Image (cartoon, helix red, strand yellow):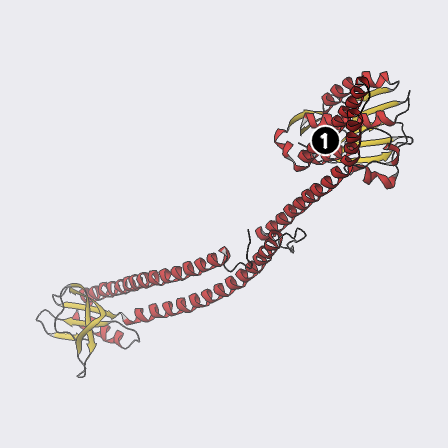
Amino acid sequence: MRIEPPIRTSRSVACAQLTWALLLIAFVGAGAGVWVITRTTAENEIRERIQLEMNALDHEIALEGMPAAIAAIRGRTHIPGSLDYRLVDASGRVLIDDIGLASLPAGWKVINVRDGANGERERDHEDFLVLTAATPAGGLLSVGDDLERAERVRSAVLVALFWVGLVALLVTVAAGAILSRAALTRMNRLSSTLARVSAGDLSARVATDVHKDDLGELARGFNAMLDQIARLVANVRRVSTDVAHDLRTPLAHLRLQLESASQAPTHEAASEGIRAAQSKVEDVLRLFEATLRLGEIEAGASRARFTRVNLAAVIERVTDAYRPDVEAQGRILSAHAPEMCDIDGDADLLSQALANLIENAMRYTPRGAPIDVQLDCAAGIALTVRDRGPGIAAENREKARAPFARLDAARSTPGAGLGLSIVDAIARLHGAELELDDAAPGLRATLLWRRVPH
């Protein structure tokens, strides 16, 4: 599968475009809402003003008479922004007429008027609100106001909203473009790295940055995945090479023994050669089994079997199983463990790790010397196996962990060199470290959990 970089589209771009569209819709909706609300609010305010003026003039006519009301109206008309009036007495005579319309029905009315060429108002469009009612003296009083002032206020609000919305939209578009470009650049780096890896370059890595966001976490997780893949591939290559190297000698011996057995002069000699060949076959099978076990552990497949494990119970079970063999060889196996020291793990793998450490100690501990197994849960968890053998020099301790590693002191002993490698893999699977230290004399091998695993 080939992946072509760079990524030319991004969900961040789509999200930015959706944000711009939603922002535009929001401002259009806000403008429509302002248009309706301001019109209704302005008209209500004008109605209240007209109604108050109508009540005041009715009171004036009732108390002071028509002349006083006429004087009050004429005094108000000289004030800027005043209302318009039409006053008719009981006989139908027009006393005041600022509105300029011949007849007006009783009640509220929005009418179409304009100033004509002769100074009289003519019907044109809705721009005038008027209230007509009977006066206490028997005439008709009309009070009106021009709606254009409210329209001007509303238009000013809409213009301000338009410019604010335009500026906000431009800022949002610019910010979205910048952020989307940055996200696209980072995604393109990820895509380019993925293309290099798919082409076979397992050394490719995504350039990480200081951003602690989703893309930063994705890049770090991607690099961690590539590191693990590189380790697994390197392990496969190394194991393949080591297995081929380690199998060469036993398979050559096996062929010679089979040839010798086929040419043996007696039946007993042939049987002896076949038994020796079978022993070599068993060594090869153990090597393959240990190699497969190591690969399974390093792949992390055993995590699915994790349960709550009591390390003290593991130590007791393993040391009880090995104590007869250790004592039969003239050595002493002691164990010291607190009763409660639990972790999440695989009891079988932990038992195998401890067994490998005990077997390693049995190979090198002289007769009569003790082998100590100790568990310390005071600060973190430390499972230690100490022998009294020659130990491992500091410069060789890292090499001793490698698969198929055989130090000079171990060349004459049986084994494939996978014991400490399996222990190290089990330790890493359980979040621990294998530490090899000088016990003066001997080797101190410790499975160390720096933080208590839960």
Residue 168 is left or right of residue 212, and the answer is left
Q: Quadrant of residue 443?
A: top right
Q: Position of residue 385 (x, y in %)?
A: 82, 27
In front here: 396 or 78? 396
The residue to which callout 1 is attached is 290
In front here: 249 or 239? 249
Residue 438 is left or right of residue 95, and the answer is right
Q: Is residue 413 visible?
A: yes
Picture quarter with the C terminus: top right
Q: Please report the residue visible at 74 percent of the width from the left and 37 percent of the height from the top.
A: 243
Give the answer, above or below, for where 258 lies relative to 163: above
Q: Please report the residue visible at 23 percent of the width from the left and 76 percent of the height from the top.
A: 74
Q: Is residue 68 visible?
A: no
In front here: 263 or 223? 263
Q: Position of residue 258 (x, y in %)?
A: 77, 27
Give the answer, above or below, for where 90 lies relative to 295: below
Marker count (numbered): 1
